Image (tube, grey):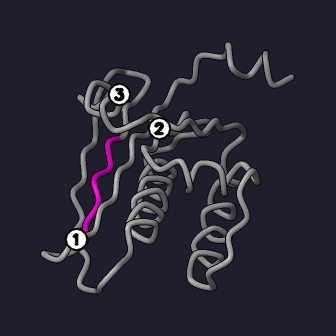
Amino acid sequence: MMEEQSKKIFKWQLHVDGSSNTHGSGAGVVVLTPEGDSVECALHFDFKATNNQAEYEALIAGLKISTVLGADEVEIFSDSQVVVNQVLDEYQARDESIITYLELAKELLERFKEYRIVHAPEKKMKRLMP
């Protein structure tokens, strides 16, 4: 089953990236439609976030945007190995705020008929983003 899903070509793609540093926190989201259009969104947070929180904020925003655009299936690319593996239940979330983010992300993922989330390291992400 997993092998079949890895061969599937998804009509919608979602690329997410969040970051946090001493200058602030933010995220970038790119949704690629089946028609080849892209919807890009840059987010700046008015609160102090950890890198993992920023990554989840990007994922959650991207899932909401994808849903509003009508996506019923989506392939998600994230450069956060932690977030990807927590969503896949490979890693356990321990921090209360991260657990809350994870639960919300999984709730949003239930809106899709099918999805795949992939760890795409930063260098690869830059190549994937339009």
Tag 1: amino acid: Asn
Q: Give the number of the disc on residue 124.
A: 3
Relative side of 24 to 28, left or right: left
Q: Position of residue 36 (x, y in %)?
A: 33, 21
Tag 3 near tag 2, CB within 8 Å: no
Asked whether, in this view, residue 18 is left or right of residue 60, the answer is left
3 and 1 marks in contact (CB < 8 Å): no
Q: Which residues are magenta?
A: 25-30
Q: Quadrant of residue 45?
A: bottom left
Quarter placement of the N terminus: top right
Image label count = 3
Closer to the camera in the image, 91 or 28 = 91
- Measure the alpha-carbon separation of dots 3 and 2: 10 Å
Q: Residue at x 62, y 79 (%)?
A: 100
Residue 112: x %, y % from top left: 66, 45
Sequence order check: which comes first, mark 3 or mark 1? Answer: 1
Residue 26 vertical placement versus 76 (above, below): below
Give the residue type at disc 2: Phe
What type is the residue that disc 3 sits on? Lys
Please tell me whether mark 3 sits on a helix, a strand or a loop.
Answer: helix
For residue 21, the mark is 1
Residue at x 69% of width, y 20% of height: 6
Quick one: which residue is furthest to the right in this view? 1
Residue depicted at x 26% and y 32%? 126
Q: Earlier in the sequence, mark 1 or mark 2?
A: 1
Q: Nearer the viewer, mark 3 or mark 2?
A: 3
Main secondary structure along the magenta-highlighted residues: strand
Q: Is residue 87 left or right of residue 68?
A: right
Circle 3 crowding by C-alpha within 10 Å: few under 14, some 14–19, many from 20: few
Dot 2 corresponds to which residue?
77
Q: Residues under labels 1 and 2: Cα distance? A: 22 Å
Closer to the chain start, of discs 3 and 2, is 2
